[in-house]
Image (tube, helix red, strand yellow):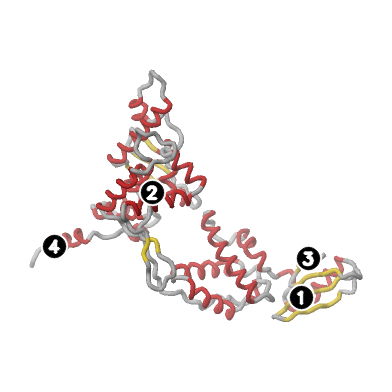
């Protein structure tokens, strides 16, 4: 019987006449349209709202996210990124509904309301998460400013907090050895007894390719050329922006693990006259994921893969998180993504030019590669010691 329109509602009374119920600047107005005709009542409502610059030009808070998704002014982002932005917006919308129920459109949000909301964020979030939410909300308001007829930006002048981000650290050689040993003892469900653990191979792939967890779990035989000794794929994270292929040379240690995996697959399907080693070397007979059981697990429930990896890290006596002063929860420090940091650091410390490392790991700039690069103190000392004494 009631439908939102413009800045207010039209509600049909028992008499059949339509009544306007409007909220403006915190005040509620209830006026009869004195008509039983729905379209005529709509025109009465719009005439009432027009002098106030409201009406159909408003953008209800309930419609903000849908309008943002439809907007041609926003950047094209991956689904996971958009999901994260949606959660940030829904948190703000629910806060507005709880504390400012009378404000139901984007233009009604003021700088004072934003300031109150930010006070709540400061008490619960670290600076990095706080800054991320501020930037997302600021962008949503900027993209929809024209459609919502915003007279002023309530986020103007809002400052970001000093960055306190804590990146993943690289792993030491001793930690890598312990990690591989711990992974060897863990078998995936349905895995053959005479084959090494898929979790062990997953760790090896992460160490020697620098790929992200998702790309390692979903690594497919079609992306591997054992004859040429290279892996070629488009990283999942950058598929939405571009389809730039990264080419990764296969390290000898990784090559051995891949050959073993190929031979295990051959053993499961070969006939009496087939030569397993020949098929493994060509790898042209294989389709599907290199780690079929882990790939299936990652596709169904990613958290199971993360939980199993955390257990392997703990078995290797590697602390996965640290407590940072000022934060409620522990911050991740050593995870599977640390293998990516380790790959970049090992390559850079070995003298590989940053632009080459950038090409292998798929970074769009050397600045991002430097973020992953952790200097080797001994290498720095050697560099300074090489300067002749004057």
In what element is the residue under mark 1?
Answer: strand
Residue annotated with mark 2: 211
Q: Earlier in the sequence, mark 2 or mark 3?
A: 3
Q: Is residue 64 positioned above or below 362 on the image?
A: below
Task: Give the label, 4 or 2, closer to the camera.
Answer: 2
Give the CA distance from mark 1 to mark 4: 77 Å
Q: Earlier in the sequence, mark 3 or mark 4?
A: 3
Residue 381 in view in this figure: yes
Q: Position of residue 85 (x, y in %)?
A: 54, 62
Give the CA distance from mark 2 to mark 1: 55 Å
Using the image as rendered, state which of residue 155 and residue 251 is in the foreground.
251
In what element is the residue under mark 2?
Answer: loop
Task: Give the label, 1 or 4, closer to the camera.
Answer: 1
Give the CA distance from mark 1 to mark 3: 12 Å
Q: Is residue 76 positioned above or below 143 on the image?
A: above
Q: Earlier in the sequence, mark 1 or mark 4?
A: 1
Answer left or right for 24 relative to 38.
left
Residue annotated with mark 3: 3
Residue annotated with mark 4: 385
Residue annotated with mark 1: 22
Q: Position of residue 152 (x, y in %)?
A: 60, 77
Give the CA distance from mark 3 to mark 4: 77 Å
- Residue at left 80%, top 76%? 48
Give the CA distance from mark 2 to mark 3: 51 Å
User: Is mark 1 in CB contact (under 8 Å) with mark 3?
Assistant: no
Q: Position of residue 151 (x, y in %)?
A: 63, 77
In what element is the residue under mark 4?
Answer: helix
Among the 4 quarters of the image, the one containing residue 33: bottom right
Using the image as rendered, state which of residue 10 and residue 101 is in the foreground.
101
Pick out the residue farthest to the top: 273
């Amino acid at each position: 019987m009631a439908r939102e329109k413009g800045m207010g509602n039209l509600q049909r009374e028992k008499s059949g006449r339509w009544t306007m119920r409007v909220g403006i600047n915190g005040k509620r107005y209830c006026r009869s349209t004195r008509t039983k005709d729905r379209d005529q009542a709509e025109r009465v409502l719009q005439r009432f709202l027009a002098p106030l610059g409201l009406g159909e030009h408003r953008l209800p808070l309930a419609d903000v996210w849908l309008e943002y998704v439809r907007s041609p002014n926003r950047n094209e982002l991956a689904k996971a990124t958009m999901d994260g932005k949606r959660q940030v917006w829904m948190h703000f919308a629910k806060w507005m509904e709880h504390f400012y129920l009378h404000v139901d459109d984007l233009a009604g949000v003021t700088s004072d309301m934003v300031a109150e909301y930010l006070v709540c964020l400061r008490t619960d979030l670290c600076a990095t998460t706080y800054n991320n939410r501020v930037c997302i909300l600021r962008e949503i308001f900027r993209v929809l400013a024209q459609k919502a007829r915003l007279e002023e930006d309530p986020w103007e002048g809002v400052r970001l907090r000093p960055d306190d981000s804590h990146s993943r650290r690289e792993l030491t050689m001793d930690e890598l050895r312990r990690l591989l040993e711990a992974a060897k003892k863990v078998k995936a469900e349905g895995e053959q007894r005479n084959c090494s653990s898929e979790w062990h191979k997953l760790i090896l792939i992460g160490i020697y390719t620098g790929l992200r967890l998702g790309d390692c779990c979903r690594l497919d035989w079609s992306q591997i050329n054992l004859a040429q000794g290279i892996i070629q794929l488009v990283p999942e994270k950058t598929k939405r922006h571009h389809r730039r292929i990264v080419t990764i040379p296969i390290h000898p240690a990784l090559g051995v693990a891949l050959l073993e995996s190929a031979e295990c697959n051959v053993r499961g399907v070969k006939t009496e006259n087939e030569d397993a080693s020949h098929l493994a070397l060509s790898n042209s007979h294989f389709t599907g994921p290199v780690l079929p059981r882990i790939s299936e697990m990652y596709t169904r429930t990613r958290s199971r893969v993360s939980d199993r990896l955390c257990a392997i890290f703990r078995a290797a006596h590697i602390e996965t998180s640290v407590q940072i002063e000022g934060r409620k929860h522990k911050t991740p420090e050593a995870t599977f993504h640390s293998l990516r940091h380790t790959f970049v650091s090992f390559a850079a410390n070995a003298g590989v030019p940053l632009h080459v490392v950038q090409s292998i790991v798929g970074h769009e700039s050397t600045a991002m590669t430097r973020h992953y690069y952790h200097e080797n103190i001994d290498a720095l000392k050697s560099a300074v010691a090489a300067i002749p004494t004057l």
